[in-house]
Image (cartoon, helix red, strand yellow):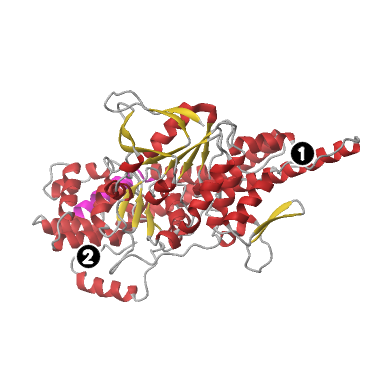
Amino acid sequence: MTDLQLLPKLDGGEPDVLRNARQITLVGANGAGKTRFMKELMRRVGDRAYYLSALSASFPERSPSQMPGSIDMMYQQLAAKRPYMRSDAVSEIDKLAYMLVTDEFDILLDLKTRALAGEKIAPPKPSRLDRVMRVWETVFPGSEILRNAGRLMFETGSGDDPVAAVTLSQGEKAVFYYTTAVLYAMPGAVIFIDSPTLFLHTAILNTVWNTIESLRPDCTFVYNTVDPDFVNSRTQNTCVWIRSYDADKHAWDYRVLDYASITDDLFVDIIGSRRPVLFIEGDRVHSIDAKLYTLVFTDYTVRPLGSCDKVIETTRTFNDLRRMHHLDSRGIVDRDRRTDAEVDYLRRKNILVPNVAEVENIFLWEEVVRVMAEARGKNPDRVFPQVKDSVIELFSHQYDKQALEHVRHQVKRAVECKIDGRFTCITALEAHLRQLPDKLRPRDTYNHLLNDFSQMIKDGDYAGILRVFNYKPMLSECPVARLLGFSSKDDYISGVLWRLKGHDDVANRLRDAVKHCFGIYGEGMPPLVESKPAQQQDAAPQTGKPSSAHQPQEPRQQPRQRLKPGRGAERRKWKKKHSKNNSGDDRR
């Protein structure tokens, strides 16, 4: 245990110092700055900081940590010193398993060496693996961890044959991960745990963390959590309530709570809504995404996460946990320059992708323009053709640049994947890089896209152009705002959002129009695609982790969102009812 000085306060007061802290819980509402607070605290703690997150422990799609003393760094250093240790582990769980087995080999080799030297051998002290096995049997009575031919196998008590770690449930993986990881923390470490209740059933939660903490009485445990039951379960707990963060001052509004002062009202503020969750890009204050999707998907709690990668990772993780929290979890990311294969892959992962390149293009979606024209007392049949002609004209002057940007995106993603292999020497890497142009064929892809884009212009394929045209100034340079009686692009966007705040026919039609841009017709969302076991996960395409997306592809029908049974009939009924006003909005 150690003294821990907290961070600068927003009111200018002296930062609190926690003396001989054993357990610290960071609590606060979503977006209050808990994660930023924890990361800054880690930075200030320095080499004694040790970060654990079961959220990313099983997944290889992450950047290895460069923090001194991290699992990734320990594994890298140990693999360099032990020629008999496997060096191909990617996830933190695999690395910890290999480190445990290597420790066992080290102990056995040492015992044999000393025995051959004629030393009197005392019974060895319990190894890290022995201690992990003891915790495992405490948490999961009737289950065992077995040493088997240099591998760890898990007997789950079901009567089935022992299984490898990869087939364990997420909860079992979390217990193994946390237990093993804390045993490798440096002496006197400050162990930061992000979402300690994630994957763990409430019935075993206290047993797990009480047992884990008992393994390292020399360490301080800092938990970032929104679970009130977990906070109350920490008997030596110091609770830090983080209320907000000021980026300009780089300071937090927070206070250290007396254990008895943690009220139900506070935790209602922390936990927030229990509605289905929709993860999106951007932030709540500045991005159009949050303002638009909050008004369109009104049955969902919309949570901006920043990057598209964070949206994809979080949506996948939440759906893996659906049996525990019972919430529908989906994501939305811009199409940008993704290929059809990438979009189809994301949709199978419950990520909604619009049939336009970026969120701004939704405001040019034909149905949106027509509804707004009617609402503003304009003739949609006069307004929309002018908008359409203007957008096609803009695209005709830039389609070659747009094709180049699409090729650049595909080549970049493909190269990231292709040089992610293992090379025995620099010569092999150089040889591989020299072959990339022939394998990627960027000029063939460019010419193919030029032909596609040129055909869109000839055909007047407005919907197709919106799908591939990434051009931020488009809303300003086309006359949509002026034709609808708005003073500027921003005024037009505000006008659409203002209409969406209502509950009249215009608001409902606008919501439907935006949903149609995602291929959603009728009531409700498409059904969730259930997660597959790890061994059956779909391979990501080459441009998310690409495979052949860099190759020229024949044009094919744009994949649509999966619809519920009977949704096709609902869509035909809707089209018939609204055919007068939506003459072109259903093209893809």
At which x and y percent is residue 510? 20, 59
Q: Going from the N terminus, do you reach mark 1 or mark 2 first?
A: 1
The boundaries of the magenta stretch are 385-399
Relative to 61, is 163 above or below? below
Q: Quadrant of residue 30?
A: top left
In this rendered view, identify the residue nearer to me: 314 or 158: 158
Left or right of residue 44, residue 480 in this image: left
Whether residue 454 appears in this view of the structure is yes
At which x and y percent is residue 553? 50, 57
Q: Main secondary structure of the magenta part?
A: helix
Residue at the spot 15% in from the left edge and 60% down from the top edge? 503
| Disc marking residue 83 | 1
| Disc marking residue 582 | 2
Residue at the spot 15% in from the left edge and 54% down from the top edge? 499
Element carrying mark 2 = loop
In this rendered view, identify the residue nearer to me: 45 or 347: 45
Task: For the C terminus, give its image quadrant.
Answer: bottom left
Element carrying mark 1 = loop
Residue at the spot 20% in from the left edge and 47% down from the top edge? 493
Q: Nearer the viewer, mark 1 or mark 2?
A: 1
Q: Distance between the Cα atoms at labels 1 and 2? A: 68 Å
